[in-house]
Structures are given as C-alpha cells and as structure tokens.
Amino acid sequence: MLQTSPDNRTADNRTADNRTSDSRSIGELLGDLTREVSALVRDEVNLAKTELSQKAAGVVKHLGGIAIGGVLALTGLWALQYAIIVALDEVMPLWAASLLVGVIVIGIGGALVMKGINALKAENLAPQQTIETLKEDAQWAKQQIK
C-alpha cells in the first residue's frame, strides 16, 4: 500500500521528483545559468538606462537655469550699466566709467558661470545603483558557478 503525504503525492513520486531535479546534466545547469545571467544583464541594462535618464534630467535642469539666468541678467545689466555709466560720467571721463562698469559686470558674470559649472561638477553622473547591483550580481554568479 502506498502512503500519501498531506500534499497527496506518494512517497514513490517524491523520490522520483528528487532524482529528476538532482540528475540534471552539466549542460542543463550551464544552460539555466546562461539564461539567468542573460536575464540579469538585460535587467541591469534597463536599470542603467533609467538611472542615466534621471541624471540627464538633472543636468538639463541646471543648464536651463544657467541659460535663463544669463539672459535675464544680461538684459537687466544693460539698463543698469547705462544708468551707472551716465552717473559716473559726471565724475570721470566716459571711457573710464564704461571701463569700470564693464570690469565689474564681467566679474559678476564670471562668478555666476563658475557657480553653474561647479553645480554640474558636483552632480554625480555615474549610475550608482546599477554599479552596486552589478557588483552583487557578479558575486551571485561566482557563487552559482561553484
């Protein structure tokens, strides 16, 4: 008489199932590993694309801010430069007033550009999450091969 387990499988069937799963050939195991690694690589590539897209959006935001700020500053400065030059013309020659105002404006503009460049340099563009998961995946693959 066959004994049945709670999951309604016989002891003979369980033994046959265990032998089947334990008796896979090396070729089958390598095939499974290859399929799993391929799926893993595809997932990692998709993760990298997503992460890089997010980083690129941040860079575009900074570049847009630099451009808009530059245009606004330029138009406002033209009016202020003219007013300051006219006011300084009362106490110094026109050429000296223009030179003084020009040097000051170039200094301020250079500082704003450097601030924007430094903000871009501070932005970490490497896909950190993808790098970490690739390291984990490499360790997992090494363990699977053992």
Image (spheres, rainbow, N blue to C red):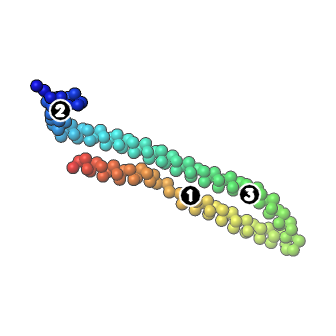
Residue 100 horizontal/vertical position (percent): 77, 70
58 vs 130, left or right, is: right
Q: Nearer the viewer, residue 20 or 132?
A: 20
Q: Which residue is mark 2?
A: 14
Q: Residues at badges 2 and 1 in contact (C-beta under 8 Å)?
A: no
Q: Do we see residue 41 in this rendering?
A: yes
Q: In the rendered structure, find residue 102 and report the number of the disc placed on it.
A: none
State the CA–CA distance, disc 2 to disc 3.
81 Å
Mark 2 belongs to which amino acid?
Arg
Earlier along the polypeptide chain: callout 1 or callout 3? 3
Mark 1 vs mark 3: give the one in front: 1
Q: Quadrant of residue 2?
A: top left
Earlier along the polypeptide chain: callout 2 or callout 1? 2
Q: Nearer the viewer, residue 8 or 50?
A: 8
Residue 14 lies, with reference to residue 94, above or below; the image says: above
Residue at (82, 62) in percent of width and height: 82
Q: Which residue is mark 1?
A: 120
Mark 1 belongs to which amino acid?
Leu
Mark 2 vs mark 1: give the one in front: 2
Residue 11 horizontal/vertical position (percent): 15, 31
Residue 117 horizontal/vertical position (percent): 59, 60
Q: In the rendered structure, find residue 74 and report the number of the disc placed on it.
A: 3
Disc 2 element: helix
Q: Residues at badges 2 and 3 in contact (C-beta under 8 Å)?
A: no
- Residue lying at the far bottom of the rendered structure: 91
Residue 11 lies, with reference to residue 76, above or below; the image says: above
